[in-house]
Image (cartoon, rainbow, N blue to C red):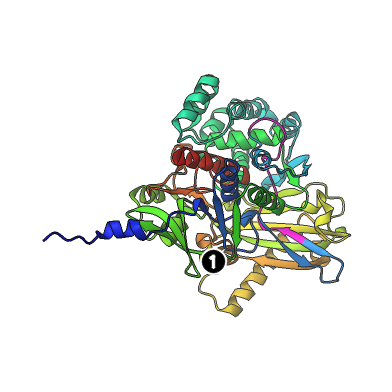
Amino acid sequence: MTSTLPSQTLLQALYTPSPAWDAIVIGAGIGGLVAASQLAAKGYRVLVLEKYLIPGGSAGYFERPDPLGNGIYRFDVGASMIFGLGTQGTTNLLTRALAAVGQSLESIPDPVQIAYHLPKGLNPRVHRDYEQFLQELSGYFPREAAGIRRFYDSLWPIFNSLNAMELLSLEEWGYLFRSFVSNPLGCLTLARYLPVNVGQVARRCLRDPDLLRFVDMECYCWSVVPADRTPIINAGMVFCDRHYGGVNYPKGGVGQIAQKLAQGLEAHGGQIRYKASVRRILEERGRAVGVELASGEKLFARTIISNATRWDTFERLWPGSLPTAERQWQKRYQQSPSFLSLHLGVRAEALSGERYCHHILLEDWDQMEAEQGTLFVSIPTLLDPDLAPPGRHIVHAFTPSWISTWQGLSPSQYQTQKQQAADRLIRRLEALWPQLGSHIELREIGTPRTHRRFLSRSNGTYGPIPSRDPWGLLGMPFNRTAIPNLYCVGDSTFPGQGLNAVAFSGFACAHRVAADLS
């Protein structure tokens, strides 16, 4: 006798709630917020779930009262060297993302991107003015002056090609066709450089070993890998945009970018829920259909966008086995280090005469990629004094560190190691500002364990880096994944790390999702 009972598959179809949302975004980092706000601006129903109390992730902020009761310090969680807030071209992706949801942000131009303090007295400044930068660097390497110009000039065709087109999803064939028809030369230029890394071009133009090491540092300061493992297209964006759109610090701190994106998202009908920790992605017949929160609540959507790292997405949130494509990607890319961060509130006398916001300090070339080797420094109050109480400055120093350095410690050992590491960083900083240590009024120390806890990132990593010399950008995954209805956004996707890069990822993801939904 034939059963009249519905099959298990039919029962699932009957009792699975219809999606309340077109897209659920896991995480309110900049990539997730750009994707969410772009979709909301197009009229889609969007919900962002954020574990923490405020948006931004590593582009967020935290506040601490001055111990003497003079006011509040507002600290940037991560870097304060911001690209993408320019006013011209198409590579000003943060400006464009804000404008798409009716928002804008006052920013302060930084006349010098970085003041370097490197071995053998190599201390050039990267001026916003391109010619001034080339002249200063050539002063350190007069015999290489022609090669220096040839190397940096070779990056402008890449940047100009990017800056002449709308940057959307390379996975959408209609967009690629329209881009090629409107700008065939630019598209062919980018296609030519897709498999190329910076080191290949640098060695064709430059010979001096210390100059090539300087180019390594120019790459390492934003890609966390030397020139041989940095895609030339990414370098074209960074090395040229610092002279075109420039580095611009947002008034009120970096966290204002996320705050404004969140306001624009909500103004266009999207929603953000804070203190909403996602336990797992819900799966039905191999497809992503929703999420389950730590509270047990289940939410359903037509698409799921993960702003978590790909390691967290597929090893912690996705209930199924690791897809083959992700397994292959993990062979090509590894986690970048996290950071040891030191946030200081200091009396202004400690930095008397200092004019430059961003510094990089390295005493030994062999230590550039080592644990706590390169030291990055930001003094954002030189641009926006309102971030600190009157007569005070913020000094944010951070250096790469692996979580393995901080594991297996008792609570007392952990605290002791943190304080010792902070003391070492302060001694290094005193090579630049000898009176710094005696003028500190507040200090906060964060380790890779801190970053893992508050940012929910595997091992506190700041994204993927190639495990060997890559083929330029060809190894980076795009937004779609092997799981139907599941997308990734952020620094684990094309084009990689940095706020402007993850904004690009957000634009691309929203474009791809909208094309698929429609």
Up-down relation of residue 84 to residue 353 (above or below): above
Residue 86 drawn at (x, y percent): 71, 37
The quarter of the image holding the N terminus is bottom left
431 horizontally vs 390: left or right: left
Residue 434 drawn at (x, y percent): 81, 59
Q: Is residue 128 magenta?
A: no
Q: Helix or strand or loop: what does disc 1 sit on?
A: helix
Residue at horizontal 46 percent and vertical 34 percent from the top = 172
Up-down relation of residue 49 to residue 22 (above or below): below
Q: Which residues are magenta?
A: 74-90
Residue 424 drawn at (x, y percent): 68, 65
Q: Amino acid at mark 1?
A: Thr
- Residue on which disc 1 sits: 405
Res. 429 visible in picture: no
Q: Quadrant of residue 155?
A: top right
Residue 6 drawn at (x, y percent): 25, 59
Farthest residue to the left: give it.
1
Q: Is residue 82 magenta?
A: yes
Residue at horizontal 85 percent and vertical 71 percent from the top = 68
Residue at horizontal 69 percent and vertical 47 percent from the top = 81
Q: Quadrant of residue 157?
A: top right
Secondary structure, magenta segment, majority class: loop
Q: Quadrant of residue 168?
A: top right
